[in-house]
Image (tube, coloured by chain):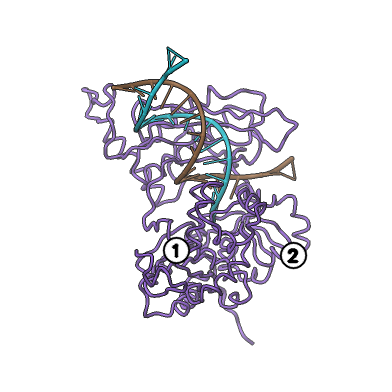
Chain colours: A purple, B brown, C cyan
Amino acid sequence: MNPGSESDSNASGRRSQSAFALIDGNSFYVSCERVFNPKLEGRPVVVLSNNDGCCVARSEEAKALGVPMAAPYFQIQKDFERAGGIAYSSNYGLYADLSQRMMSVIGQFSDRQEIYSIDESFIEWTGFRRFDLTTLARDLRQRVKRWVGIPVGVGIGSTKTLAKAANRLAKNHPDFKAHGVCNLLDLPESLQDSYLARLAVGDVWGVGARWAQKLQNLGIRSARDLKQVDPGWIRQHFSVVLERTALELRGTPCIEFEEAPPPKQQIISSRSFGQPVTTLEELTQAVSAYTARAAEKLRAQASCTGALTVFLQTNPFNVKEPQYHPSMTLRLASPSADTRILIRAALSGLKHLYKPGYRYQKAGVMLLDFSAATVEQGDLFSAFSDPTTSINPRTDRAQLMATLDQLNQKLGRGTLWIAAEGVKQNDVKQNWQMRRGHLSPAYTSRWDQLPVVRAIEYA
DNA sequence: TCTGGGGTCCTAGGACCC
DNA sequence: TCTGGGGTCCTAGGACCC
């Protein structure tokens, strides 16, 4: 673009400017719980991480009570409940389902959508010149609320970072809060800047706690300050990543819009245990279950893995106990996505790592070094069929895994599993399985837990 | 007693190659 | 006294995101 061209030099240059909107669900997990439980409206509500550990979502009322993000629940439980607060265990099945519905409604408002996380989505509105984007955003909000039941905020700007900033303002700034929409493109640059000046530098997308502190020490306190610093200087003193953020604040798009997420380069499956675990037998079950989960994800993106890391961990918060945090990476003879092969490798690693006498708090597996399933490399010694049978180990294996996935998808996770994952005795949970003491029903994904509507009789 | 579970990108330094 | 230059790959660590 010519430096002197209108859209480049003109501060408010709306003419051919790109336009992005960021839409996100307000306190998303809490809002999901509220959809089917309207009694929660107006009350302090938090949703907890796995094992009912930390508060990962807070309603406005809970924030007003001073519950910090990621607060360990056991530390605040007493005060919170005394103040009328309610806590829920994470019900990911429910949140994932409502997320899909929300995303598909949002997708009706543009042909370019990037689903950025379970509760956030960018859409591109570049070239929507005949629309008033603020009005369009309000329509979007209404439709999501009416059709899905989730309240959302919308921020609009000429780059993804500015759309993020606008979204922040839409939620927190009194000028926008009422309508939940902030459209920076509608404002002259001087006014934009005065709003950016109200946004702490640490609230800018891409600026974490570390950099925020360092920036503040240098006198760069707001989004506007960061916008006005020379990007080259930022690159020198921080990194090319933060330089891009600074450029984005100036209206220069540097961050790709990704309609289709690229395949993952690594897959992790790990969990903290419901209770400390000491025996190899329990660890074997847990590691097998996590490996099965990781293998399922691997197949879902049509990859094979060439290597796998197993790790164990004692509770790092328990400083009085002896700590042990070993890991081991195993290479497979040839890339695979077969749960049985992966479990075998993981368990052989586990046997090396396991030492009795520790109270283990967490275990996990990581898959790395992926290749496409379609170009799976044969192994000279196993690729040939046993001449006495008609079994082809490679294709039959893929078919078996596909059948496993189909059944578990159709009939629910846990319909078919590898015996090494263990068997519940009389429906009693194994120690390693996570605690979920405050779980709401799977309203939308289980027949036996559908919400029931009772007729109300009027006198 | 109880403290989440995923991911990505960038950089620096060392090993190694021609 | 003088002691190449350019490249790739891998790993660890540090930052960030939700």
Q: Nearer the viewer, residue A337 or A155?
A: A155
Q: Amino acid at mark 1?
A: Phe
Depicted A87 relative to depicted A128: above or below? above
Depicted A16 relative to depicted C5: above or below? below
Residue A159: which quarter of the image? Answer: bottom left
On the image, the x and y values in percent for residue A158 come to: 45, 67
In the picture, which quadrant includes the N terminus of chain A?
A: bottom left
Q: Amino acid at mark 2?
A: Gly
Q: Is residue B7 left or right of residue A425?
A: left
Task: Mark 1 or mark 2: name the one nearer the start of the chain.
Answer: 2
Q: Nearer the viewer, residue A71 or A425?
A: A71
Evaluate whether residue A341 shows in this view.
Answer: no
> Which residue occupies the extreme bottom position in the image?
A459
Depicted A344 relative to depicted A118: above or below? above
Label 2: chain letter:
A
Q: Residue at x 63, y 67 (%)?
A: A198
Residue position marked by numbered label 2 in the rendering: A84
Depicted A75 relative to depicted A265: above or below? below
> Which mark, by number, is residue A157?
none
Packing grade of label 1 (10 A; few <14, some 14-19, many >=20) is: many
The answer to whether marks 1 and 2 mark residues whose Cβ atoms lie closer than 8 Å is no
Residue A343: which quarter of the image? Answer: top left
Evaluate whether residue A36 shows in this view.
Answer: yes
On the image, the x and y values in percent for residue A248 come to: 48, 60
In the picture, which quadrant includes the C terminus of chain A?
A: bottom right
On the image, the x and y values in percent for residue A82 come to: 78, 61
SS for callout 2: loop
Marks 1 & 2 on one chain = yes
SS for callout 1: strand
Q: CA distance from mark 1 to mark 2?
A: 36 Å
Residue position marked by numbered label 1 in the rendering: A122
